[in-house]
Image (tube, rainbow, N blue to C red):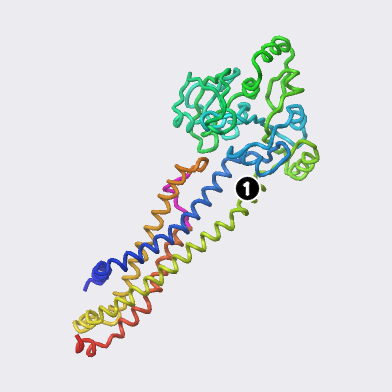
Amino acid sequence: MNLPLLSLKSLISKPLTSILSWLLLTFGVCIVTLILLVSDQLKSEINKNAAGINMVVGAKGSPLQIILSSIFHIDFPTGNISLKQADQLSKNRFITSAVPLSLGDSYRGRRIVGTTIAYPQLYQAQLSQGDWFVEDLEAVIGAEVANELSLKIGDEFASQHGLDEAGDDHGHHDFHVVGIMAPTNTVMDRLIIVSVRSVWLVHEHEEKQHAEEHHLEDSMFYLKRLKLEVTKEELENGAITSLLLTYKSPMAAVMLPRTINAMPDLQAASPAFETARLFNIIGTGVQVLNILGMVVVIISGISIFIALLNSLKERKYEIAIMRSLGASQSAIFIHVILEGFFLSVLGGITGLLVAHIGIGILGDTIDGLNTEVFFFLYEEVYILLGAIGLGFTASILPAIFALKTDISTTLSKG
C-alpha cells in the first residue's frame, strides 16, 4: 500500500478545503519571512552605507534627518554650515578625516552631491568608464544613474533645484559627464557626484562669478583636511551641507558630540545611534506584522485540523475498507498524518518562495533598497520546520480518531 500516494490523492479529492489550508499557511509564512528578510537586508544596507562614517555634522535640527539626508540621501538637509567652521572643526585632534558634502540639487530625481574624491573612496568605488571629476561642472555618475537615465560619457545636463523632477533647472550651467562608477551596491550607485565648487557655481549669478574669478584667481587656499582648494572669499563666506567624520580614537565618541552641539550653528549626529533609534521607531509596526503573520499561521493550522477532521466523516467507510484489507492502525495513523505533512510542507515552501519574490519586487520599487532575491537566512529553516511541525500537530487528533474507527459498525452501515 503506497501511503504517500494515497494521502496525496485524498488531498486532491477535496481541492477547496486543501487549497484554503495551503493558501492560509502560505500567506502566514510569507508575512513572517518577508519581515525577516526586509529587516535583515535593511540592516545590511544601513551598515554598508554608514561604513567608515563615525559622525555626521550638519546644521541645527533633527539628528535623524541629518543622517537620512547625508548618508542615505532620502531626506532634505536641515540647512547649511559655514565652510570656515567646517574647516576649523576638521582640524580637531580627534578627527582622522572629514568629507564635505554640498546638497540641494538633483537631476531627474537623482541627487547631485558636491564633494571631493574622498567621498567615493569611503565606499571603495571604482570607475568603469572615464575619469574622476577635476574641473568645475564635471560629473561622475553612479551605475544605476547611468542605466536609468541613459547617460554616457560626454553627455551634458542641467541640475534642478531640490529633489523634485519638476524643480527649476539651472540652465546657465550644464554639467558634463566625465566618468561612470562601477556598481558598488551602496548609495553611490544612485548619486551624481561633482566638486563642491560646481555646486556653488550653479547657484551664483554669472556676472558676479566672473567678476570674482578675475579678482580672486591668485588668492587660493588649500584646506588640507577637507581636501578643498578655495578662494579667500569662499573660505569666509562659503557654505556646505554637512561633514562626514571619521574618528581617530574611541575617545572622540565621547568628546566630539558635546563640543559640536555646544556650537550655536552645528549639530552632531551618530549614524549608529540614529539608525538604532529608527529601528526602535518602526519596531512596533514590525512586531504587529509579525504577530499578524503568526496568527495567520495558527489559523492555517486550525484549518488543516478542521479539514482533516471533516474529511474523516466522509471517509469512515474508506478507512474501514482499508482496515479490512489488512491495513494496520499505524498505517491509518501515518496516512492521515501524511496529509497534514504534505499540506504544511507545500504551504511552507511556497510561503518562502513568495516572500523572496516579494523582496525582489520591493527592491525594484523602493528607491534605496538593494535586495538579494536568492539570499536565504538560516532562520528560514526554523520557519519551515515550524510550519511542518504545525501541520503535524494539527493532524495528530484526526489521525487518532481515524485509527479508532470501528470496522464492523462502519461496514454494516455502508
The answer to which quarter of the image holds residue 63 is: top right
What span is in magenta? 371-378
In the image: residue 339, left or right of residue 135: left
Task: Reply above or below: 372 against 320.
Answer: above
Q: Look at the image and tell me in which quarter the C terminus lies.
A: bottom left
| Total residue callouts | 1
Q: Residue at x 45, y 45 (%)?
A: 372
Q: Amino acid at mark 1?
A: Thr
Q: Assign a secondary structure to mark 1.
A: helix
Task: Reply above or below: 230 against 108.
Answer: above
Which residue lies most toward the top here?
214
State whether the magenta stretch is mostly helix, strand or loop: loop
Location of residue 218 in the rendering, given as x and y in whole percent from the top left corner: 72, 11
- Callout 1 crowding tier (Cα within 10 Å): few <14, some 14–19, many ≥20: some
Please tell me whether residue 211 belongs to the stretch shown in magenta. no
Location of residue 213 in the rendering, given as x and y in whole percent from the top left corner: 69, 12
The answer to which quarter of the image holds residue 105 is: top right
Q: Residue at x 64, y 15 (%)?
A: 206
- Most foreground residue, 341 or 316: 316
Q: Look at the image and tell me in which quarter the N terminus lies.
A: bottom left
Q: Residue at x 51, y 60 (%)?
A: 290
Location of residue 282 in the rendering, given as x and y in whole percent from the top left corner: 59, 53
- Most foreground residue, 284 or 243: 284
The answer to which quarter of the image holds residue 214 is: top right
Location of residue 215 in the rendering, given as x and y in whole percent from the top left corner: 73, 10
- Most foreground residue, 411 or 377: 411
Q: Residue at x 37, y 62 (%)?
A: 23
- Most foreground residue, 65 or 45: 65
Q: Which residue is mark 1?
A: 275
In the image: residue 390, left or right of residue 67: left
